[in-house]
Image (tube, rainbow, N blue to C red):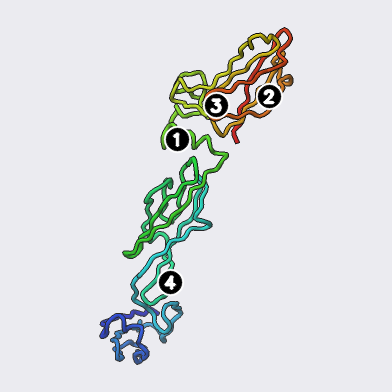
Amino acid sequence: MKTHILLAAFLAPAASFAQVTQLATPATVSGGHSTSANYTLDSAIDPMASAPSSSASYTSRPGFVGQLYEVTALTLTAVPSTTVNESGTTQVAAGATLDDGSLLVPDPQQVKWAVVSGPVTSIAADGTATAGTVAADTPATVSGTYLGKTSQLVLTVRNVPTDDFASWQVDNFGAGAANNPLAAATADPDNDGQANLMEFLGGTNPNLAASVFAVRVENVVGQPTRKAVVFGQVTTGRTYRVLASTDLTAASWTDISGPLTGTSGTVTFTDTAATGARKFYRVQISKP
């Protein structure tokens, strides 16, 4: 059976639609014209059908097969959270409040999504927001527009410590660092003899040749059994250890200084047991 219902006219303002309490007189099997106090209904029923029937179900206002509504407010939420790890994703959804107080959850594809500000690289048509790379926890704002109403949501893009080198690359080589060969871990863009990964660990500037980590060994005047190990430039957030060896084998390196820290310039550690024919030194840098 094919059923065609033509809504010919509303005789009352849209606001009174919700107040209709009397349904029109049912149409006959062949269709017909019915009226009530508030609307006019013209119906037509497939004459080939043996009897009128309907299997449709409706979940709108009780007693009515259709409804008119206006969106009065839009609210955005994020699942699982408004906090998202850098390079991660979160799902943004919209909830629309209607003029009768009910709530509608629109299909995300019907919402116009946009990135307003901050390190969100994109937001897809289905509301999936992708975070960029950050050096510290950073806010970002996205928006959604549905049927003339716009709302914004603030996300927090969280810095992931294990990805700090990527953040450092962005800070020193710009947003396109991932595709910039000068930003690669093994590259040396300032030609100072230290690759980017070493500059990252040392806290030096990869674009400035004068900014370099260096180690030198000096004699201690009047004390032939001592050597001064001078290293830097040092920076905050790093721990330094002076290691010594007599034969350069991996197993022979010994920590002779314990943890050392500094905020700028150089640090000097004095080895009080610099005896023997030869002794080698190196400085180990640790970054949390």
The residue under label 3 is 234
Instruction: State the SS at label 4.
Output: strand
- In three-dimensional space, the C-alpha distance between marks 3 and 4, rounded to whole angstroms, equals 58 Å
Residue type beneath disc 2: Ser
Q: Earlier in the sequence, mark 1 or mark 2?
A: 1
Residue type beneath disc 3: Val
Residue 257 image label: 2
Residue type beneath disc 1: Asp
The residue sitting at 37% across, 82% down in the picture is: 48
Q: Quadrant of the N terminus?
A: bottom left
The residue under label 1 is 171
Q: Height in image: 215 above or below 60?
A: above
Instruction: State the SS at label 2.
Output: loop
In the visual, does 250 lie left or right of 142?
Answer: right
The residue under label 4 is 103
In the visual, does 185 lie left or right of 259?
Answer: left
Q: Earlier in the sequence, mark 1 or mark 3?
A: 1
Percent of width and height locating residue 260: 63, 28
User: Is mark 1 in CB contact (under 8 Å) with mark 2?
Assistant: no
- In three-dimensional space, the C-alpha distance between marks 4 and 2, rounded to whole angstroms, equals 66 Å
Q: Which of the 4 quarters of the picture holds residue 237?
A: top right
User: Is mark 2 in CB contact (under 8 Å) with mark 3?
Assistant: no
